[in-house]
Structures are given as structure tokens and as C-alpha cells.
Image (tube, rainbow, N blue to C red):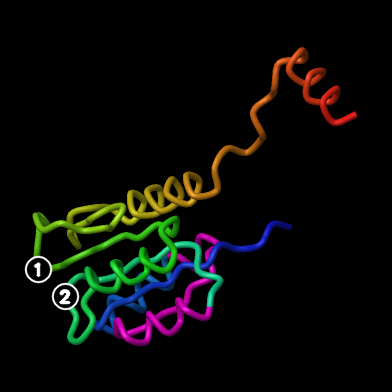
Amino acid sequence: MKPKKTILCVDDNEQALSIRKVLLETRGYRVLACNSGELALEAFRRGGIDLVLTDLLMPGVDGSRLIEEIKRLSPQTPAVLISGRIKVYERETLADLFLPKGMYEPAELLERIRVLLVRKRGPKRPVDLHPRAMDVAHASVA
């Protein structure tokens, strides 16, 4: 059995956080839920996070700043920025994806998360080398 992917889910709205957590857990993800950017950053620094899903507008460390810090620590970690108040995010962001709350179906969020995690992991199999290239590689080792 392959290990579950861990998603760090961040929102200062406890109800929204709870709904997202249940949605993700029912799809087989392990979810670490935090209600502030500061707590999320502490959780991320402990390691083991495969993707970050964060609200944009939060007191203290907002979602955009949280993603900046996460990308500084781990550039390959996918990050999704969501907002209920802002429908189009025009500022420069390091987020891999911006979604306005209520403007997407839960299935769309789950599919986009799946795609981001697949991209992070890379191809399932190594690229097959041409048989002749394999012979040259083995000959140089001998």
C-alpha cells in the first residue's frame, strides 16, 4: 500500500477548514489543518508535507506570505491559494494555482490537487534509454 500524501490545509475560518479537511480525507489524503499562517509554517518546517492549500486573507501571516516562505524552504512543494473575498488575484504570487472560493466544484479542486501532486512526483517510470545507449553506458562502467 502506497503512503498517503500529506496536505497542509490552512484557513482562519474554522468551518471552511473543517469542510476542506473532510473532503480531502475522504479522498485518501492525510490532512494537517492549521487556522493560522504562523502555525502552518511551524508544521511545514517539521517536514512531510506534499502540498499546501491555504486561504489568502488571514490575520498575521497571510496565504501569499505563507507560500513565499514555503517556496523559499522547498521550491518543489505545490501550493494552492484560495480566497472567498477576492475573485481574481492580480498580485505576483508564487502559488502554483489560485482558486476563488465558491467558483469551483469540489471535484475540480480534487483533480487539480491530484495533477499538482503527479507533477511533483514526476513520471511513473524512468525514460527508456535506447538499447545502444545502454550498451555504451555499461561499457564505460566496466
- Side (left or right) of 27 relative to 34: right
Marks 1 and 2, how far apart at CA: 8 Å
Q: Nearer the viewer, residue 110 or 139?
A: 139
Q: Position of residue 129 (x, y in %)?
A: 70, 22
Q: Position of residue 50 (x, y in %)?
A: 50, 63
Earlier along the polypeptide chain: callout 1 or callout 2? 2
Q: Residue at x 51, y 60 (%)?
A: 27
Q: Is residue 45 above or below residue 84?
A: below
Q: Nearer the viewer, residue 89 or 67?
A: 67
Per the image, the residue denoted by label 1 is 85
Q: Quadrant of the N terminus?
A: bottom right
Magenta residues?
Answer: 24-46
Q: Where on the picture, by quarter, is residue 44?
A: bottom left
Task: Residue type at mark 1: give it.
Answer: Arg
How would you rate the neighbour count of disc 1 (Cα within 10 Å): few for under 14, some for 14-19, many for 20 or more? few
Per the image, the residue denoted by label 2 is 57
